[in-house]
Image: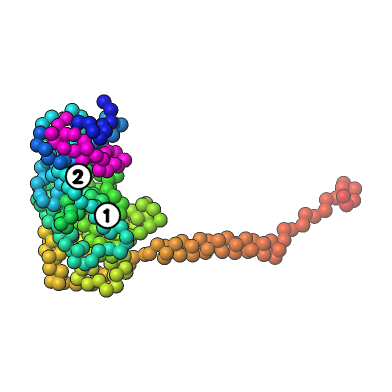
Amino acid sequence: MREVSVGEYLDQYKLTEVIARSGMASIFKAIDSESGQTVAIKVPYMQFESDVVFYGRFQREEEVGRRLDHPHIIKVLSPRHKSRMYIAMEYVEGTSLRAMIRDGQGLPVDKALDLARQICEALVYMHSQGVVHRDLKPENILITADGKIKIMDFGIALDESARRLTWSGLSSTIGTPDYMAPEQVSGRRGDVRTDIYSLGVILFEMLTGNLPYSGPNVYGVMKAKTSEDPQPPTAFKPDLDPHLEEIVLHAIERNPRNRYETAAQLLKDLNDPASVQVQNRAARLHPRSLAMQRLRRGLAFGAFFVSLIGIFVLLIWLANRYPAARTPPRRSYRGEVK
């Protein structure tokens, strides 16, 4: 078996063009020769097809996708016959949410709220089906020409109806650091509140063009998520409506018990932000900026260096103040000094 190419048939699908490539798979635009429908085909690279862990993840993505049926979720199709590993999906013309907020300026408030509501509607349905996405991020959200969202990529989804054995050993290494909930960083499986956290981060980014945590690398970001409070949205956008800031900070509470318990509760507030009671969450935060962290590390190193110099000077002073006793001259048996 070899890699497939544009122009070839993969069972009933004729591959017409490459839509995207990732580190593990290619996504092709294709035509279903039986129905004439345009579809998308996700085909993993050959070297991953024999990987047991990857196979389980890929199979889970297909199984979950077939079970879910919602206008804001990419629909997975069922081919008549499969000669190799791939996923057939509905084809959606659109652009990723990442492309819309890449300039770092965020989105207009009305637009950000509209998209957040649609994502939350999908979460309400998804969670009612016992599925937790666990990898919500702008790259996994498509926006159509008429402004509708489509969530995709259920490769690391948690399916409560499936055996836990399928995902044992994977939970500690899954997710995307910027959007991972603190409990994911700590290696726990997560639940519906994990998706609520990710949506809160996405809304934060749509409103401000920034993320609540920053660091010199992914490890710094992950450590901060488990030990520090986030920056409040108003640190980047001072004129932001306090009701919206309250919603965002409620969604991204570090402790899952302090977040919205359900996506339905979050959706209610997103539909009517003005009714949200502002509890001054931002005033209770104690975020440490990256600059402050560097300053504290610098001061600590400086204090250590100065203390070493002080100890060295003290030793020299003591040596001069209390010189070692001179060794008395040795005499011969005749009493002569030698």
Disc 2 versus disc 1: nearer the observer: 1
Please indicate, yes or no, whether residue 190 appears anywhere in the rendered image: no
Q: Which mark is residue 154?
A: 2
Amino acid carrying label 2: it is Phe
Q: Which mark is residue 207?
A: none
Amino acid carrying label 1: it is Arg
* Numbered disc 2: secondary structure: loop
Residue at image x 80%, y 55%? 328
Q: Residues within 10 Å of mark 1 (few under 14, many from 20)?
A: some
Residue 295 part of the magenta segment: no
Residue at image x 67%, y 64%? 317
Q: Which residues are magenta?
A: 11-33
Residue at image x 88%, y 52%? 337
Position in image of residue 49 (x %, y %): 26, 31
Residue under numbered circle 1: 98
* Numbered disc 1: secondary structure: helix
Q: Earlier in the sequence, mark 2 or mark 1?
A: 1
In the foreground, 185 or 110? 110
The reply to whether dot 2 and dot 1 touch (C-beta < 8 Å) is no
Q: How many marks?
A: 2
Q: Residues within 10 Å of mark 2 (few under 14, many from 20)?
A: many
Q: How is the image coloured?
A: rainbow
Instruction: Identify the main secondary structure in magenta.
Output: strand
Residue at image x 26%, y 33%? 5
Q: Is residue 45 left or right of residue 143?
A: right
Position in image of residue 161 (x %, y %): 11, 42
Please indicate, yes or no, whether residue 154 appears anywhere in the rendered image: yes
In the foreground, 53 or 39? 39
Establish if 132 lies above or below 245: above
Position in image of residue 157 (x %, y %): 19, 45
Position in image of residue 126 (x %, y %): 12, 50
